[in-house]
Amino acid sequence: MSEKKDHFAYKAKEYETEIRRTNNVLNIADGIKDKIVFKNTDHIIDFGSGTGLLTQEFAPYVKKITAIDMSKSMTEILRAKENSFKCELEIKEIDIITYKTNNKYDGIISSMTIHHIEDIEKLFKQFYSILNDGGAIGLADLETEDGSFHSVDTGVFHFGFDKDEFLQIASKVGFKNLEIKTISVVEKPYGRFPIFLLTGIK
Ligand SMILES: C[S@@+](CC[C@H](N)C(=O)[O-])C[C@H]1O[C@@H](n2cnc3c(N)ncnc32)[C@H](O)[C@@H]1O
Protein backbone atom coordinates (compact mmCIF):
# COMPACT_ATOMS: atom_id res chain seq x y z
CA MET A 1 0.00 0.00 0.00
CA SER A 2 1.24 3.49 -0.79
CA GLU A 3 2.40 5.67 2.10
CA LYS A 4 1.57 8.79 0.13
CA LYS A 5 -1.24 11.04 1.35
CA ASP A 6 -4.72 9.93 0.29
CA HIS A 7 -5.81 13.13 -1.45
CA PHE A 8 -9.26 11.72 -2.15
CA ALA A 9 -10.18 10.65 1.40
CA TYR A 10 -12.50 13.62 1.95
CA LYS A 11 -14.51 13.08 -1.25
CA ALA A 12 -14.52 9.32 -1.99
CA LYS A 13 -17.90 8.59 -0.38
CA GLU A 14 -19.76 11.27 -2.34
CA TYR A 15 -17.64 10.93 -5.49
CA GLU A 16 -20.27 9.18 -7.62
CA THR A 17 -23.14 11.43 -6.54
CA GLU A 18 -22.11 14.35 -8.77
CA ILE A 19 -24.01 14.10 -12.06
CA ARG A 20 -21.63 16.29 -14.08
CA ARG A 21 -18.80 13.96 -13.02
CA THR A 22 -20.59 10.72 -13.96
CA ASN A 23 -21.81 12.24 -17.26
CA ASN A 24 -18.27 13.31 -18.08
CA VAL A 25 -16.96 9.77 -17.54
CA LEU A 26 -19.75 8.41 -19.77
CA ASN A 27 -18.70 10.86 -22.52
CA ILE A 28 -15.10 9.72 -22.12
CA ALA A 29 -16.10 6.03 -22.26
CA ASP A 30 -18.13 6.63 -25.44
CA GLY A 31 -15.18 8.47 -26.99
CA ILE A 32 -12.76 5.65 -26.20
CA LYS A 33 -15.20 3.03 -27.54
CA ASP A 34 -15.49 5.00 -30.80
CA LYS A 35 -11.73 4.82 -31.32
CA ILE A 36 -10.63 1.54 -29.71
CA VAL A 37 -12.29 -1.83 -30.16
CA PHE A 38 -11.19 -4.10 -27.34
CA LYS A 39 -11.56 -7.89 -27.65
CA ASN A 40 -13.07 -10.27 -25.11
CA THR A 41 -9.60 -11.80 -24.68
CA ASP A 42 -7.96 -8.48 -23.77
CA HIS A 43 -6.43 -7.60 -20.42
CA ILE A 44 -6.37 -3.84 -19.92
CA ILE A 45 -5.44 -1.34 -17.22
CA ASP A 46 -7.66 1.47 -15.96
CA PHE A 47 -5.10 3.90 -14.61
CA GLY A 48 -6.40 6.09 -11.76
CA SER A 49 -9.51 3.95 -11.62
CA GLY A 50 -10.87 5.68 -8.52
CA THR A 51 -14.31 4.29 -7.65
CA GLY A 52 -14.46 2.45 -11.01
CA LEU A 53 -16.71 4.73 -13.05
CA LEU A 54 -14.69 4.18 -16.25
CA THR A 55 -13.71 0.62 -15.34
CA GLN A 56 -17.31 -0.56 -15.23
CA GLU A 57 -18.02 0.86 -18.71
CA PHE A 58 -15.37 -1.43 -20.24
CA ALA A 59 -16.00 -4.58 -18.19
CA PRO A 60 -18.50 -6.06 -20.70
CA TYR A 61 -15.96 -5.88 -23.55
CA VAL A 62 -12.72 -7.35 -22.15
CA LYS A 63 -11.47 -10.44 -20.32
CA LYS A 64 -9.80 -8.67 -17.42
CA ILE A 65 -9.24 -5.18 -16.06
CA THR A 66 -6.46 -4.28 -13.67
CA ALA A 67 -7.67 -1.20 -11.81
CA ILE A 68 -4.72 0.82 -10.53
CA ASP A 69 -5.21 3.57 -7.98
CA MET A 70 -3.14 4.67 -5.00
CA SER A 71 -6.06 6.05 -2.99
CA LYS A 72 -7.27 3.71 -0.25
CA SER A 73 -10.59 5.53 0.10
CA MET A 74 -11.38 5.46 -3.64
CA THR A 75 -10.42 1.78 -4.08
CA GLU A 76 -12.58 0.88 -1.05
CA ILE A 77 -15.62 2.10 -3.01
CA LEU A 78 -14.53 0.06 -6.03
CA ARG A 79 -13.97 -3.07 -3.90
CA ALA A 80 -17.50 -2.78 -2.52
CA LYS A 81 -18.94 -3.32 -6.02
CA GLU A 82 -16.33 -5.64 -7.53
CA ASN A 83 -18.75 -8.60 -7.69
CA SER A 84 -20.99 -6.68 -10.08
CA PHE A 85 -18.28 -6.46 -12.77
CA LYS A 86 -18.83 -8.38 -16.01
CA CYS A 87 -15.12 -9.28 -16.38
CA GLU A 88 -12.28 -10.38 -14.13
CA LEU A 89 -11.23 -7.48 -11.96
CA GLU A 90 -7.87 -7.05 -10.24
CA ILE A 91 -7.49 -4.06 -7.93
CA LYS A 92 -4.01 -2.71 -7.24
CA GLU A 93 -3.71 0.02 -4.64
CA ILE A 94 -0.37 1.35 -5.85
CA ASP A 95 1.37 4.29 -7.49
CA ILE A 96 1.50 3.65 -11.26
CA ILE A 97 4.91 5.29 -11.58
CA THR A 98 6.64 2.76 -9.34
CA TYR A 99 4.63 -0.26 -10.61
CA LYS A 100 7.05 -3.01 -11.64
CA THR A 101 5.65 -5.97 -13.55
CA ASN A 102 6.56 -8.58 -16.15
CA ASN A 103 2.95 -8.56 -17.37
CA LYS A 104 2.09 -6.98 -20.71
CA TYR A 105 -1.31 -5.41 -21.25
CA ASP A 106 -3.49 -4.95 -24.35
CA GLY A 107 -4.61 -1.46 -23.46
CA ILE A 108 -4.52 1.38 -20.95
CA ILE A 109 -7.51 3.62 -20.37
CA SER A 110 -7.65 6.58 -18.01
CA SER A 111 -10.06 9.32 -17.03
CA MET A 112 -9.28 12.60 -15.23
CA THR A 113 -6.08 11.34 -13.60
CA ILE A 114 -2.98 12.40 -15.51
CA HIS A 115 -2.98 15.98 -14.16
CA HIS A 116 -2.13 14.34 -10.81
CA ILE A 117 1.17 13.01 -12.23
CA GLU A 118 4.24 15.23 -12.06
CA ASP A 119 6.42 13.73 -14.80
CA ILE A 120 4.27 13.01 -17.86
CA GLU A 121 7.09 11.71 -20.05
CA LYS A 122 8.00 9.20 -17.33
CA LEU A 123 4.34 8.13 -17.21
CA PHE A 124 4.21 7.58 -21.00
CA LYS A 125 7.46 5.57 -20.82
CA GLN A 126 5.89 3.41 -18.11
CA PHE A 127 2.76 2.92 -20.26
CA TYR A 128 4.91 2.02 -23.27
CA SER A 129 6.95 -0.51 -21.31
CA ILE A 130 3.93 -2.42 -19.95
CA LEU A 131 1.91 -2.58 -23.21
CA ASN A 132 2.01 -5.36 -25.78
CA ASP A 133 3.00 -4.34 -29.31
CA GLY A 134 -0.21 -3.02 -30.84
CA GLY A 135 -1.60 -2.23 -27.38
CA ALA A 136 -3.84 0.84 -27.26
CA ILE A 137 -4.03 3.94 -25.10
CA GLY A 138 -7.22 5.93 -24.49
CA LEU A 139 -6.40 8.76 -22.09
CA ALA A 140 -8.77 11.58 -21.17
CA ASP A 141 -8.05 14.60 -19.01
CA LEU A 142 -8.45 18.33 -18.59
CA GLU A 143 -7.38 20.76 -21.29
CA THR A 144 -5.38 23.79 -20.14
CA GLU A 145 -7.36 25.64 -17.45
CA ASP A 146 -6.78 28.56 -15.07
CA GLY A 147 -6.49 26.46 -11.92
CA SER A 148 -10.11 26.93 -10.88
CA PHE A 149 -11.25 23.37 -11.77
CA HIS A 150 -10.27 22.04 -8.34
CA SER A 151 -11.70 23.84 -5.33
CA VAL A 152 -9.49 21.69 -3.05
CA ASP A 153 -5.96 20.55 -3.89
CA THR A 154 -6.16 16.81 -4.50
CA GLY A 155 -2.49 16.51 -5.45
CA VAL A 156 -2.68 18.48 -8.68
CA PHE A 157 0.54 18.93 -10.68
CA HIS A 158 -0.93 20.40 -13.90
CA PHE A 159 -3.73 22.86 -14.59
CA GLY A 160 -4.73 20.70 -17.54
CA PHE A 161 -2.66 20.17 -20.68
CA ASP A 162 -2.11 21.80 -24.04
CA LYS A 163 -3.38 19.14 -26.48
CA ASP A 164 -0.51 19.49 -28.99
CA GLU A 165 2.17 19.34 -26.31
CA PHE A 166 0.52 16.32 -24.70
CA LEU A 167 0.40 14.44 -28.01
CA GLN A 168 4.03 15.32 -28.71
CA ILE A 169 5.17 13.71 -25.46
CA ALA A 170 3.37 10.49 -26.37
CA SER A 171 4.90 10.62 -29.86
CA LYS A 172 8.42 11.18 -28.50
CA VAL A 173 8.07 8.08 -26.33
CA GLY A 174 7.12 6.01 -29.41
CA PHE A 175 3.32 5.83 -29.57
CA LYS A 176 1.86 5.77 -33.09
CA ASN A 177 -1.46 6.59 -34.79
CA LEU A 178 -1.97 9.35 -32.24
CA GLU A 179 -5.15 11.45 -32.30
CA ILE A 180 -6.29 14.00 -29.78
CA LYS A 181 -9.59 15.85 -29.64
CA THR A 182 -12.04 17.47 -27.25
CA ILE A 183 -14.42 14.76 -26.10
CA SER A 184 -16.44 16.33 -23.28
CA VAL A 185 -17.00 19.57 -21.38
CA VAL A 186 -17.46 19.78 -17.61
CA GLU A 187 -19.80 22.69 -16.85
CA LYS A 188 -19.27 24.20 -13.41
CA PRO A 189 -21.14 27.28 -12.09
CA TYR A 190 -18.01 29.38 -12.63
CA GLY A 191 -16.71 27.97 -15.91
CA ARG A 192 -16.57 25.44 -18.72
CA PHE A 193 -13.75 22.92 -18.69
CA PRO A 194 -13.06 21.01 -21.94
CA ILE A 195 -11.75 17.47 -21.67
CA PHE A 196 -9.52 15.86 -24.32
CA LEU A 197 -9.12 12.25 -25.37
CA LEU A 198 -5.76 11.01 -26.67
CA THR A 199 -5.77 7.66 -28.48
CA GLY A 200 -2.89 5.75 -30.03
CA ILE A 201 -1.07 2.44 -30.20
CA LYS A 202 2.33 1.02 -29.30
C1 LIG B 1 -10.06 12.50 -10.34
S1 LIG B 1 -9.86 10.81 -9.88
C2 LIG B 1 -10.50 9.98 -11.33
C3 LIG B 1 -11.11 8.67 -11.01
C4 LIG B 1 -11.80 7.98 -12.18
N1 LIG B 1 -10.88 7.68 -13.25
C5 LIG B 1 -12.95 8.81 -12.70
O1 LIG B 1 -12.82 9.44 -13.76
O2 LIG B 1 -13.98 8.87 -12.01
C6 LIG B 1 -8.10 10.56 -10.03
C7 LIG B 1 -7.63 9.26 -9.41
O3 LIG B 1 -6.26 9.06 -9.77
C8 LIG B 1 -5.60 8.47 -8.66
N2 LIG B 1 -4.15 8.70 -8.82
C9 LIG B 1 -3.51 9.90 -8.85
N3 LIG B 1 -2.19 9.72 -9.00
C10 LIG B 1 -1.99 8.37 -9.07
C11 LIG B 1 -0.82 7.55 -9.21
N4 LIG B 1 0.40 8.09 -9.31
N5 LIG B 1 -0.97 6.19 -9.24
C12 LIG B 1 -2.20 5.64 -9.11
N6 LIG B 1 -3.34 6.37 -8.96
C13 LIG B 1 -3.24 7.72 -8.94
C14 LIG B 1 -6.22 9.15 -7.47
O4 LIG B 1 -6.02 8.41 -6.29
C15 LIG B 1 -7.69 9.25 -7.88
O5 LIG B 1 -8.46 8.17 -7.43
Image (tube, rainbow, N blue to C red):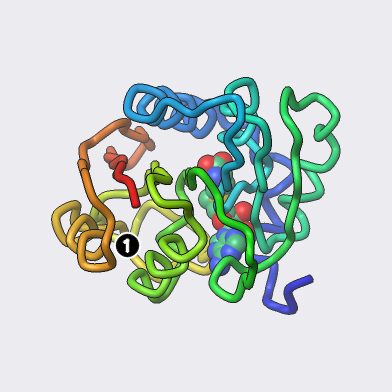
Q: Does mark 1's beta carbon lie closer than 8 Å to ligand 1?
A: no
Q: Looking at this view, name the residue that lies furthest to the front.
A: 133
Amino acid type, label 1? Phe
Q: Quadrant of ligand 1?
A: bottom right
The quarter of the displayed image where residue 102 is located:
bottom right
Residue 193 visible (yes or no): no
**Relative horizontal placement of residue 191, taking residue 52 as reference (left or right):** left
Q: Name above or below for residue 185 compared with residue 60.
A: below
Q: List x then y, in percent, for residue 169.
A: 24, 65
Residue 148 in percent (x, y) is at 35, 56
How crowded pointer 1 is (Cα within 10 Å; few <14, some 14-19, many 20+) is rated as: some
> Whole-percent x and y of residue 86?
73, 23
Residue at 36% from the left image edge and 35% from the top image edge: 186
Question: Which residue is located at x 23 percent, y 50 percent?
Answer: 176
The foreground one among 2 and 153 is 2
Q: Which residue is mark 1?
A: 159
Between residue 127 and residue 114, name the one nearer to us: 127
For the residue pair 198 and 39, the one nearer the viewer reads as 39
Left or right: 176 as drawn, with respect to 184: left
> Residue sitting at 23 percent across and 55 percent down?
144
Q: Is residue 33 above or below residue 46?
A: above
Q: As drawn, is 140 to the left or to the right of 191? A: right
Q: Is residue 153 visible?
A: yes
The kind of secondary structure element at disc 1 is loop
In the rendered image, the quadrant that contains the N terminus is: bottom right
Numbered disc total? 1
In the rendered image of this protein, does residue 86 appear above or below residue 135?
above
- In percent of the image, x 70 and y 60: which residue is there? 71
Estimate the x, y position of residue 70 in percent, counting from the top left. 67, 63
